[in-house]
Protein backbone atom coordinates (compact mmCIF):
# COMPACT_ATOMS: atom_id res chain seq x y z
CA UNK A 1 0.00 0.00 0.00
CA UNK A 2 2.27 2.71 1.14
CA UNK A 3 5.56 1.67 -0.38
CA UNK A 4 7.57 4.48 1.09
CA UNK A 5 6.52 7.40 3.20
CA UNK A 6 9.98 8.66 4.00
CA UNK A 7 11.23 8.35 7.52
CA UNK A 8 11.79 12.09 7.49
CA UNK A 9 8.04 12.61 7.05
CA UNK A 10 7.28 10.23 9.89
CA UNK A 11 9.61 12.20 12.13
CA UNK A 12 8.64 15.63 10.88
CA UNK A 13 4.89 15.28 11.41
CA UNK A 14 4.40 13.54 14.77
CA UNK A 15 1.06 12.74 16.39
CA UNK A 16 0.85 13.07 20.16
CA UNK A 17 -2.10 12.03 22.29
CA UNK A 18 -2.91 13.04 25.84
CA UNK A 19 -5.73 12.17 28.21
CA UNK A 20 -8.73 14.49 28.15
CA UNK A 21 -11.71 14.76 30.41
CA UNK A 22 -14.36 12.23 29.40
CA UNK A 23 -17.69 13.90 28.58
CA UNK A 24 -20.65 12.87 30.70
CA UNK A 25 -23.40 10.98 28.91
CA UNK A 26 -26.66 12.87 28.67
CA UNK A 27 -29.76 11.65 30.53
CA UNK A 28 -31.31 10.73 27.17
CA UNK A 29 -28.55 8.23 26.47
CA UNK A 30 -27.96 6.26 29.69
CA UNK A 31 -25.30 3.59 29.87
CA UNK A 32 -23.58 4.79 26.73
CA UNK A 33 -19.79 4.52 26.84
CA UNK A 34 -17.48 7.36 25.87
CA UNK A 35 -13.70 7.46 25.73
CA UNK A 36 -11.75 10.59 24.73
CA UNK A 37 -8.19 11.79 24.33
CA UNK A 38 -6.71 14.98 23.01
CA UNK A 39 -4.16 14.90 20.26
CA UNK A 40 -1.85 17.01 18.17
CA UNK A 41 -1.27 16.34 14.49
CA UNK A 42 1.56 18.14 12.73
CA UNK A 43 0.58 18.74 9.12
CA UNK A 44 2.51 20.51 6.36
CA UNK A 45 0.13 23.44 6.93
CA UNK A 46 0.90 23.55 10.67
CA UNK A 47 0.04 21.83 13.92
CA UNK A 48 -3.58 20.87 14.51
CA UNK A 49 -5.01 20.11 17.97
CA UNK A 50 -7.99 17.80 18.10
CA UNK A 51 -10.09 15.60 20.34
CA UNK A 52 -10.37 11.92 19.50
CA UNK A 53 -13.54 10.40 20.89
CA UNK A 54 -14.97 6.88 20.77
CA UNK A 55 -18.63 7.07 21.77
CA UNK A 56 -21.88 5.15 21.72
CA UNK A 57 -24.96 6.81 20.24
CA UNK A 58 -28.48 5.56 20.94
CA UNK A 59 -30.66 4.94 17.90
CA UNK A 60 -34.41 4.92 18.46
CA UNK A 61 -37.34 3.61 16.46
CA UNK A 62 -40.47 5.61 15.63
CA UNK A 63 -41.93 4.83 19.07
CA UNK A 64 -38.85 6.17 20.85
CA UNK A 65 -37.46 2.77 21.86
CA UNK A 66 -33.68 2.39 21.79
CA UNK A 67 -32.96 -0.32 19.23
CA UNK A 68 -29.21 0.02 18.65
CA UNK A 69 -26.00 1.67 19.77
CA UNK A 70 -23.84 3.09 17.02
CA UNK A 71 -20.23 3.39 18.13
CA UNK A 72 -18.27 6.02 16.22
CA UNK A 73 -14.69 7.24 16.17
CA UNK A 74 -14.79 11.05 15.94
CA UNK A 75 -11.96 13.52 15.44
CA UNK A 76 -12.85 17.15 16.11
CA UNK A 77 -10.50 20.10 15.77
CA UNK A 78 -10.14 22.13 18.95
CA UNK A 79 -10.80 25.85 18.75
CA UNK A 80 -12.19 27.92 15.91
CA UNK A 81 -15.76 28.42 14.71
CA UNK A 82 -17.45 25.01 14.57
CA UNK A 83 -20.31 26.44 12.51
CA UNK A 84 -17.81 27.06 9.69
CA UNK A 85 -15.83 23.85 10.18
CA UNK A 86 -16.99 20.96 7.92
CA UNK A 87 -17.77 17.55 9.37
CA UNK A 88 -17.43 14.41 7.26
CA UNK A 89 -19.23 11.13 7.93
CA UNK A 90 -17.16 8.31 6.42
CA UNK A 91 -17.90 4.64 5.92
CA UNK A 92 -16.69 1.67 3.93
CA UNK A 93 -18.95 -0.74 2.10
CA UNK A 94 -19.49 -4.47 1.96
CA UNK A 95 -22.26 -4.41 2.87
CA UNK A 96 -20.96 -5.51 6.23
CA UNK A 97 -17.58 -3.79 6.40
CA UNK A 98 -16.37 -1.60 9.23
CA UNK A 99 -14.73 1.75 8.48
CA UNK A 100 -11.24 0.54 9.41
CA UNK A 101 -9.93 0.82 5.83
CA UNK A 102 -10.70 4.52 5.38
CA UNK A 103 -9.87 5.21 9.03
CA UNK A 104 -6.38 3.71 8.93
CA UNK A 105 -5.63 3.94 5.22
CA UNK A 106 -6.63 7.43 4.11
CA UNK A 107 -8.41 9.83 6.43
CA UNK A 108 -7.38 9.42 10.07
CA UNK A 109 -4.36 10.75 11.97
CA UNK A 110 -2.54 7.41 11.79
CA UNK A 111 -1.73 5.35 8.74
CA UNK A 112 -1.10 1.61 8.36
CA UNK A 113 1.84 1.23 6.01
CA UNK A 114 1.86 -1.66 3.54
CA UNK A 115 3.88 -2.01 0.32
CA UNK A 116 2.87 0.48 -2.35
CA UNK A 117 3.85 -1.83 -5.23
CA UNK A 118 1.15 -4.48 -4.62
CA UNK A 119 3.42 -6.87 -2.78
CA UNK A 120 2.11 -8.89 0.17
CA UNK A 121 2.66 -7.12 3.51
CA UNK A 122 3.77 -10.41 5.03
CA UNK A 123 4.00 -10.98 8.78
CA UNK A 124 4.29 -8.39 11.59
CA UNK A 125 5.51 -5.98 12.66
CA UNK A 126 3.66 -3.58 10.38
CA UNK A 127 4.61 0.11 10.37
CA UNK A 128 2.04 2.46 11.89
CA UNK A 129 3.00 5.98 10.90
CA UNK A 130 1.70 9.53 11.27
CA UNK A 131 -0.57 10.64 8.44
CA UNK A 132 0.46 13.95 6.85
CA UNK A 133 -2.40 13.46 4.35
CA UNK A 134 -5.21 13.27 6.93
CA UNK A 135 -8.41 15.03 5.94
CA UNK A 136 -8.46 16.53 9.44
CA UNK A 137 -6.67 19.42 7.79
CA UNK A 138 -9.98 20.42 6.20
CA UNK A 139 -12.77 18.65 8.07
CA UNK A 140 -13.73 17.01 11.34
CA UNK A 141 -14.13 13.28 10.84
CA UNK A 142 -16.72 10.76 12.01
CA UNK A 143 -16.09 7.11 11.14
CA UNK A 144 -19.37 5.24 10.85
CA UNK A 145 -19.52 1.53 11.64
CA UNK A 146 -22.96 0.22 10.65
CA UNK A 147 -24.79 -2.10 13.03
CA UNK A 148 -23.03 -5.45 13.28
CA UNK A 149 -19.63 -3.96 12.42
CA UNK A 150 -17.05 -2.28 14.62
CA UNK A 151 -18.46 -1.86 18.11
CA UNK A 152 -21.95 -0.97 16.82
CA UNK A 153 -24.65 -3.41 17.82
CA UNK A 154 -28.38 -3.91 18.28
CA UNK A 155 -29.74 -3.62 21.83
CA UNK A 156 -32.90 -4.58 23.65
CA UNK A 157 -35.20 -6.83 21.67
CA UNK A 158 -33.55 -5.95 18.35
CA UNK A 159 -30.97 -8.07 16.55
CA UNK A 160 -28.15 -6.99 14.26
CA UNK A 161 -29.97 -8.63 11.36
CA UNK A 162 -32.86 -6.19 11.79
CA UNK A 163 -30.55 -3.51 10.37
CA UNK A 164 -29.12 -5.60 7.52
CA UNK A 165 -30.89 -4.36 4.43
CA UNK A 166 -30.74 -1.55 1.89
CA UNK A 167 -33.49 0.53 3.51
CA UNK A 168 -32.81 -0.52 7.11
CA UNK A 169 -29.14 0.38 6.79
CA UNK A 170 -29.79 3.84 5.34
CA UNK A 171 -32.45 4.64 7.94
CA UNK A 172 -30.18 3.65 10.84
CA UNK A 173 -27.24 5.68 9.49
CA UNK A 174 -29.58 8.64 8.97
CA UNK A 175 -30.69 8.47 12.59
CA UNK A 176 -27.10 8.14 13.75
CA UNK A 177 -26.07 11.27 11.84
CA UNK A 178 -28.96 13.19 13.36
CA UNK A 179 -27.97 12.00 16.84
CA UNK A 180 -24.32 12.94 16.32
CA UNK A 181 -25.22 16.41 15.07
CA UNK A 182 -27.49 16.98 18.06
CA UNK A 183 -25.08 15.74 20.70
CA UNK A 184 -22.21 17.81 19.32
CA UNK A 185 -24.35 20.81 18.36
CA UNK A 186 -23.13 20.76 14.76
CA UNK A 187 -26.33 21.33 12.83
CA UNK A 188 -24.95 24.56 11.35
CA UNK A 189 -21.71 22.98 10.11
CA UNK A 190 -21.08 22.15 6.43
CA UNK A 191 -21.72 18.42 6.07
CA UNK A 192 -20.06 15.85 3.86
CA UNK A 193 -20.65 12.14 3.36
CA UNK A 194 -17.79 9.92 2.18
CA UNK A 195 -18.43 6.32 1.15
CA UNK A 196 -16.31 3.59 -0.38
CA UNK A 197 -17.54 0.68 -2.53
CA UNK A 198 -21.08 -0.21 -1.30
CA UNK A 199 -20.74 3.19 0.31
CA UNK A 200 -21.78 4.44 -3.14
CA UNK A 201 -25.17 2.78 -2.71
CA UNK A 202 -25.45 3.93 0.90
CA UNK A 203 -24.20 7.45 0.16
CA UNK A 204 -26.51 8.08 -2.80
CA UNK A 205 -29.55 6.88 -0.88
CA UNK A 206 -28.44 8.69 2.27
CA UNK A 207 -28.22 12.07 0.52
CA UNK A 208 -31.81 11.69 -0.63
CA UNK A 209 -33.15 10.35 2.67
CA UNK A 210 -31.38 12.99 4.78
CA UNK A 211 -32.88 15.79 2.67
CA UNK A 212 -36.38 14.27 2.61
CA UNK A 213 -36.45 13.33 6.29
CA UNK A 214 -38.16 15.48 8.91
CA UNK A 215 -34.70 16.76 9.88
CA UNK A 216 -34.24 18.04 6.30
CA UNK A 217 -30.45 17.77 6.27
CA UNK A 218 -28.79 19.21 3.18
CA UNK A 219 -25.36 17.80 2.33
CA UNK A 220 -22.64 20.08 0.98
CA UNK A 221 -20.69 17.31 -0.67
CA UNK A 222 -20.71 13.60 -1.47
CA UNK A 223 -17.37 11.84 -1.86
CA UNK A 224 -17.34 8.39 -3.41
CA UNK A 225 -14.28 6.13 -3.44
CA UNK A 226 -14.59 3.28 -5.97
CA UNK A 227 -18.38 3.49 -5.74
CA UNK A 228 -21.00 0.89 -6.54
CA UNK A 229 -24.00 2.84 -7.83
CA UNK A 230 -25.74 0.24 -9.98
CA UNK A 231 -25.14 -3.35 -8.86
CA UNK A 232 -25.49 -4.53 -12.45
CA UNK A 233 -21.94 -3.28 -13.05
CA UNK A 234 -20.29 -4.66 -9.90
CA UNK A 235 -17.81 -7.55 -10.07
CA UNK A 236 -18.04 -7.96 -13.83
CA UNK A 237 -21.46 -9.55 -13.92
CA UNK A 238 -22.15 -11.53 -17.05
CA UNK A 239 -24.16 -9.17 -19.22
CA UNK A 240 -23.25 -7.21 -22.32
CA UNK A 241 -23.08 -3.72 -20.78
CA UNK A 242 -20.80 -4.97 -18.02
CA UNK A 243 -18.46 -6.62 -20.53
CA UNK A 244 -18.19 -3.19 -22.15
CA UNK A 245 -17.45 -1.27 -18.95
CA UNK A 246 -14.88 -3.90 -17.88
CA UNK A 247 -12.75 -3.76 -21.02
CA UNK A 248 -10.57 -0.72 -20.18
CA UNK A 249 -9.75 -2.31 -16.81
CA UNK A 250 -8.73 -5.53 -18.56
CA UNK A 251 -6.49 -3.50 -20.85
CA UNK A 252 -4.89 -1.49 -18.03
CA UNK A 253 -4.21 -4.72 -16.14
CA UNK A 254 -2.65 -6.44 -19.14
CA UNK A 255 -0.35 -3.49 -19.71
CA UNK A 256 0.62 -3.34 -16.03
CA UNK A 257 1.70 -7.00 -16.03
CA UNK A 258 3.64 -6.69 -19.27
CA UNK A 259 1.26 -8.82 -21.33
CA UNK A 260 0.56 -5.88 -23.63
CA UNK A 261 3.33 -3.58 -24.88
CA UNK A 262 2.35 -0.02 -25.72
CA UNK A 263 5.53 0.50 -27.74
CA UNK A 264 6.01 4.00 -26.38
CA UNK A 265 2.41 5.15 -26.69
CA UNK A 266 0.96 7.40 -24.02
CA UNK A 267 -0.89 5.13 -21.61
CA UNK A 268 -3.86 7.39 -20.88
CA UNK A 269 -4.38 8.14 -24.56
CA UNK A 270 -4.33 4.40 -25.24
CA UNK A 271 -6.86 3.74 -22.46
CA UNK A 272 -9.10 6.45 -23.91
CA UNK A 273 -8.91 4.61 -27.23
CA UNK A 274 -9.88 1.35 -25.51
CA UNK A 275 -12.84 3.05 -23.83
CA UNK A 276 -14.00 4.48 -27.16
CA UNK A 277 -13.74 1.05 -28.78
CA UNK A 278 -15.62 -0.52 -25.87
CA UNK A 279 -18.57 1.87 -26.19
CA UNK A 280 -18.54 1.72 -30.00
CA UNK A 281 -17.56 -1.33 -32.11
CA UNK A 282 -17.45 -3.71 -29.15
CA UNK A 283 -20.89 -2.75 -27.83
CA UNK A 284 -22.33 -2.94 -31.35
CA UNK A 285 -20.84 -6.41 -31.82
CA UNK A 286 -22.24 -7.69 -28.54
CA UNK A 287 -25.72 -6.35 -29.30
CA UNK A 288 -25.60 -7.93 -32.76
CA UNK A 289 -25.40 -11.34 -31.10
CA UNK A 290 -25.48 -14.29 -33.50
CA UNK A 291 -26.29 -11.90 -36.34
CA UNK A 292 -22.74 -10.50 -36.31
CA UNK A 293 -20.98 -11.04 -39.64
CA UNK A 294 -17.82 -13.19 -39.54
CA UNK A 295 -15.67 -10.38 -40.91
CA UNK A 296 -16.90 -7.97 -38.23
CA UNK A 297 -16.41 -10.60 -35.54
CA UNK A 298 -12.83 -11.25 -36.60
CA UNK A 299 -12.04 -7.52 -36.59
CA UNK A 300 -13.46 -7.06 -33.09
CA UNK A 301 -11.66 -10.16 -31.81
CA UNK A 302 -8.35 -8.88 -33.15
CA UNK A 303 -8.82 -5.63 -31.24
CA UNK A 304 -9.88 -7.42 -28.04
CA UNK A 305 -6.79 -9.61 -28.17
CA UNK A 306 -4.51 -6.65 -28.84
CA UNK A 307 -5.95 -4.67 -25.93
CA UNK A 308 -6.11 -7.46 -23.34
CA UNK A 309 -3.33 -9.90 -24.18
CA UNK A 310 -5.78 -12.82 -24.25
CA UNK A 311 -5.51 -14.84 -27.44
CA UNK A 312 -7.85 -14.40 -30.37
CA UNK A 313 -8.86 -18.05 -30.09
CA UNK A 314 -9.83 -17.50 -26.44
CA UNK A 315 -12.01 -14.52 -27.34
CA UNK A 316 -13.57 -16.50 -30.19
CA UNK A 317 -14.38 -19.44 -27.91
CA UNK A 318 -15.82 -17.02 -25.33
CA UNK A 319 -18.02 -15.47 -28.06
CA UNK A 320 -16.53 -12.03 -27.30
CA UNK A 321 -17.66 -12.28 -23.66
CA UNK A 322 -15.05 -12.77 -20.93
CA UNK A 323 -16.20 -12.33 -17.34
CA UNK A 324 -14.05 -10.58 -14.76
CA UNK A 325 -13.34 -13.80 -12.86
CA UNK A 326 -12.26 -15.61 -16.03
CA UNK A 327 -10.04 -12.71 -17.05
CA UNK A 328 -8.38 -12.68 -13.62
CA UNK A 329 -7.54 -16.36 -14.00
CA UNK A 330 -6.60 -16.40 -17.67
CA UNK A 331 -4.30 -13.38 -17.98
CA UNK A 332 -1.33 -14.88 -16.10
CA UNK A 333 -2.36 -18.55 -16.25
CA UNK A 334 0.86 -19.60 -18.01
CA UNK A 335 2.90 -17.97 -15.23
CA UNK A 336 0.88 -19.77 -12.53
CA UNK A 337 -0.82 -16.65 -11.15
CA UNK A 338 -4.23 -15.00 -10.94
CA UNK A 339 -4.66 -11.25 -10.55
CA UNK A 340 -6.63 -9.51 -7.84
CA UNK A 341 -10.28 -8.53 -7.84
CA UNK A 342 -10.12 -5.28 -5.88
CA UNK A 343 -6.68 -4.42 -7.26
CA UNK A 344 -5.43 -6.27 -10.31
CA UNK A 345 -1.86 -5.13 -9.66
CA UNK A 346 -1.76 -7.89 -7.04
CA UNK A 347 -1.11 -11.43 -8.17
CA UNK A 348 -1.47 -14.67 -6.27
CA UNK A 349 -0.07 -18.14 -6.93
CA UNK A 350 -2.66 -20.59 -8.26
CA UNK A 351 -2.19 -24.28 -7.52
CA UNK A 352 -4.93 -25.39 -9.91
CA UNK A 353 -3.65 -24.51 -13.35
CA UNK A 354 -6.81 -25.55 -15.21
CA UNK A 355 -9.50 -24.01 -12.99
CA UNK A 356 -11.88 -21.57 -14.63
CA UNK A 357 -11.79 -18.93 -11.87
CA UNK A 358 -9.27 -17.75 -9.26
CA UNK A 359 -9.18 -19.41 -5.85
CA UNK A 360 -9.06 -16.10 -3.93
CA UNK A 361 -8.29 -12.38 -4.07
CA UNK A 362 -4.55 -11.86 -3.40
CA UNK A 363 -5.12 -8.23 -2.36
CA UNK A 364 -7.14 -9.15 0.72
CA UNK A 365 -4.52 -11.67 1.75
CA UNK A 366 -1.84 -9.07 1.10
CA UNK A 367 -3.08 -6.25 3.35
CA UNK A 368 -5.77 -7.56 5.72
CA UNK A 369 -3.54 -8.64 8.59
CA UNK A 370 -1.65 -5.33 8.54
CA UNK A 371 -4.82 -3.28 8.88
CA UNK A 372 -6.19 -5.39 11.71
CA UNK A 373 -2.91 -5.27 13.62
CA UNK A 374 -2.47 -1.55 12.99
CA UNK A 375 -5.97 -0.71 14.19
CA UNK A 376 -5.62 -2.80 17.34
CA UNK A 377 -2.23 -1.26 18.10
CA UNK A 378 -3.57 2.24 17.59
CA UNK A 379 -6.81 1.95 19.57
CA UNK A 380 -5.43 -0.07 22.50
CA UNK A 381 -2.12 1.77 22.67
CA UNK A 382 -2.19 5.38 21.51
CA UNK A 383 -5.91 5.89 22.14
CA UNK A 384 -5.83 3.87 25.36
CA UNK A 385 -9.19 2.29 24.59
CA UNK A 386 -9.84 -0.54 27.06
CA UNK A 387 -13.18 -2.19 26.45
CA UNK A 388 -12.41 -5.84 27.25
CA UNK A 389 -16.08 -6.81 27.15
CA UNK A 390 -16.36 -5.79 23.50
CA UNK A 391 -14.95 -7.13 20.26
CA UNK A 392 -14.38 -4.87 17.28
CA UNK A 393 -15.94 -6.60 14.26
CA UNK A 394 -13.94 -5.72 11.18
CA UNK A 395 -16.77 -7.21 9.14
CA UNK A 396 -20.25 -8.37 10.04
CA UNK A 397 -20.68 -12.12 10.42
CA UNK A 398 -22.77 -13.36 7.50
CA UNK A 399 -23.98 -9.86 6.70
CA UNK A 400 -23.72 -10.06 2.92
CA UNK A 401 -25.83 -13.18 2.55
CA UNK A 402 -28.58 -11.80 4.80
CA UNK A 403 -28.83 -8.34 3.23
CA UNK A 404 -32.44 -7.47 2.38
CA UNK A 405 -33.56 -5.82 -0.85
CA UNK A 406 -35.00 -2.34 -0.92
CA UNK A 407 -38.76 -1.92 -0.73
CA UNK A 408 -38.48 -0.16 -4.10
CA UNK A 409 -37.15 -3.38 -5.62
CA UNK A 410 -39.22 -6.13 -4.04
CA UNK A 411 -41.00 -7.24 -7.20
CA UNK A 412 -40.15 -10.55 -8.81
CA UNK A 413 -38.74 -8.71 -11.83
CA UNK A 414 -37.24 -5.72 -10.03
CA UNK A 415 -33.71 -6.35 -11.32
CA UNK A 416 -30.47 -4.99 -9.95
CA UNK A 417 -30.36 -2.29 -7.28
CA UNK A 418 -29.68 1.04 -9.02
CA UNK A 419 -29.13 4.16 -6.89
CA UNK A 420 -28.27 6.62 -9.65
CA UNK A 421 -31.88 7.91 -9.67
CA UNK A 422 -31.60 8.56 -5.92
CA UNK A 423 -28.38 10.52 -6.50
CA UNK A 424 -30.09 12.50 -9.27
CA UNK A 425 -33.01 13.28 -6.93
CA UNK A 426 -30.63 14.43 -4.18
CA UNK A 427 -28.81 16.73 -6.63
CA UNK A 428 -32.10 18.06 -7.96
CA UNK A 429 -33.43 18.89 -4.50
CA UNK A 430 -30.14 20.47 -3.39
CA UNK A 431 -28.67 22.73 -6.10
CA UNK A 432 -25.45 23.21 -4.11
CA UNK A 433 -24.70 19.51 -3.61
CA UNK A 434 -21.34 18.69 -5.20
CA UNK A 435 -20.00 15.21 -5.92
CA UNK A 436 -16.42 13.89 -6.01
CA UNK A 437 -15.69 10.40 -7.38
CA UNK A 438 -12.35 8.57 -7.11
CA UNK A 439 -11.76 5.48 -9.26
CA UNK A 440 -8.84 3.10 -9.67
CA UNK A 441 -7.78 1.84 -13.09
CA UNK A 442 -6.95 -1.58 -11.62
CA UNK A 443 -10.27 -2.07 -9.82
CA UNK A 444 -12.17 -4.88 -11.51
CA UNK A 445 -15.03 -4.83 -8.97
CA UNK A 446 -16.17 -1.25 -9.60
CA UNK A 447 -14.55 -0.14 -12.81
CA UNK A 448 -13.61 3.30 -14.11
CA UNK A 449 -15.87 3.09 -17.15
CA UNK A 450 -18.85 1.88 -15.09
CA UNK A 451 -18.54 4.93 -12.83
CA UNK A 452 -18.19 7.27 -15.79
CA UNK A 453 -21.21 5.72 -17.49
CA UNK A 454 -23.39 6.01 -14.38
CA UNK A 455 -22.36 9.61 -13.80
CA UNK A 456 -23.33 10.52 -17.37
CA UNK A 457 -26.93 9.38 -16.91
CA UNK A 458 -29.90 11.80 -16.90
CA UNK A 459 -30.31 13.92 -13.79
CA UNK A 460 -26.62 14.01 -12.86
CA UNK A 461 -25.37 17.58 -13.36
CA UNK A 462 -21.84 17.26 -14.82
CA UNK A 463 -20.99 20.77 -13.68
CA UNK A 464 -21.19 19.61 -10.06
CA UNK A 465 -19.33 16.33 -10.47
CA UNK A 466 -15.56 15.90 -10.20
CA UNK A 467 -14.09 12.56 -11.34
CA UNK A 468 -10.49 11.53 -10.76
CA UNK A 469 -8.89 8.25 -11.84
CA UNK A 470 -5.79 6.82 -10.14
CA UNK A 471 -3.11 4.27 -11.03
CA UNK A 472 -4.20 1.79 -8.39
CA UNK A 473 -7.20 -0.34 -7.45
CA UNK A 474 -10.33 -0.24 -5.31
CA UNK A 475 -8.40 1.13 -2.33
CA UNK A 476 -6.22 3.42 -4.39
CA UNK A 477 -4.76 4.87 -1.19
CA UNK A 478 -2.65 1.73 -0.69
CA UNK A 479 -0.53 3.07 -3.57
CA UNK A 480 1.66 5.89 -2.30
CA UNK A 481 1.53 8.20 -5.36
CA UNK A 482 -2.24 7.72 -5.60
CA UNK A 483 -2.64 8.41 -1.88
CA UNK A 484 -0.82 11.72 -2.30
CA UNK A 485 -2.87 12.68 -5.38
CA UNK A 486 -6.17 11.68 -3.78
CA UNK A 487 -5.42 13.63 -0.61
CA UNK A 488 -4.57 16.71 -2.68
CA UNK A 489 -7.74 16.31 -4.77
CA UNK A 490 -9.88 15.98 -1.64
CA UNK A 491 -8.41 19.11 -0.11
CA UNK A 492 -9.23 20.98 -3.32
CA UNK A 493 -12.80 19.65 -3.25
CA UNK A 494 -13.33 20.97 0.29
CA UNK A 495 -11.86 24.39 -0.39
CA UNK A 496 -15.03 25.98 -1.91
CA UNK A 497 -16.98 25.41 1.34
CA UNK A 498 -18.75 28.64 2.27
Image (spheres, helix red, strand yellow):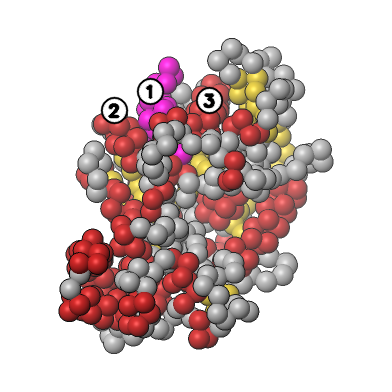
Q: Residues within 10 Å of mark 2 (few under 14, many from 20)?
A: some
Residue drawn at 50 percent across, 62 percent down: 342
Question: Is the Cβ of the residue at disc 2 closer than 8 Å to that at disc 1?
Answer: yes
Q: CA distance from mark 2 to mark 1?
A: 9 Å
Q: Residue furthest front?
A: 290
**Helix, strand or loop at disc 3?**
helix
Q: Is residue 214 magenta?
A: yes
Q: Nearer the viewer, residue 9 or 407?
A: 407
**Residue 433 in which image quadrant:** top left
The answer to whether any part of residue 289 appears in the image is yes
Q: Is residue 494 left or right of residue 476?
A: left
Point out which mark residue 2 bears: none
**Residue 35 in which image quadrant:** top right
The answer to whether any part of residue 479 appears in the image is no
Task: Say which residue label 3 marks.
Answer: 175
Task: Say which residue label 2 marks.
Answer: 429
Q: Is residue 28 magenta?
A: no
- Figure check: 295 above or below 283: below
Q: CA distance from mark 3 to mark 1?
A: 13 Å
**Residue 242 in which image quadrant:** bottom left
* Residues drawn in magenta: 202-220
- Figure check: 46 above or below 170: below
Task: Say which residue label 1 marks.
Answer: 212
Residue drawn at 64 percent across, 16 percent down: 65
Instruction: Of the two numbered discs 3 and 1 on the same chain, state the one appearing first in sequence.
Output: 3
Q: CA distance from mark 3 to mark 2?
A: 20 Å
**Helix, strand or loop at disc 1?**
helix
Q: Residues within 10 Å of mark 1 (few under 14, many from 20)?
A: some
Q: Position of residue 182 (x, y in %)?
A: 53, 21
Q: Residue furthest right?
A: 388
Q: Residue furthest top?
A: 63
Q: On the rendered image, what quadrant is the C terminus found in?
A: top left
Amino acid sequence: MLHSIALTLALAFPVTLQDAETPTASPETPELATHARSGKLALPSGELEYTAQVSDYAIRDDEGNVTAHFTAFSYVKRGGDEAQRPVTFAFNGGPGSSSVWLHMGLLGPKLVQVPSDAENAGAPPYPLIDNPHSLLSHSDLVFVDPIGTGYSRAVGESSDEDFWGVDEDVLSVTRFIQEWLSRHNRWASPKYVLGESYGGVRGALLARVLKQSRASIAINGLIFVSPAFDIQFVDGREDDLTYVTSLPTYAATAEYHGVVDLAGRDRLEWLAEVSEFAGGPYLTALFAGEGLEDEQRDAVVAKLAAYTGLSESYWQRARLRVSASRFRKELLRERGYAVGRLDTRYRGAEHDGVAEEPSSDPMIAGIGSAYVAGFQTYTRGLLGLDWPERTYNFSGSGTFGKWKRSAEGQGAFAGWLDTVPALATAMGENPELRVFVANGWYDIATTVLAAEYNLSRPGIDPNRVTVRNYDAGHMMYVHQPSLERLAEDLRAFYTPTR
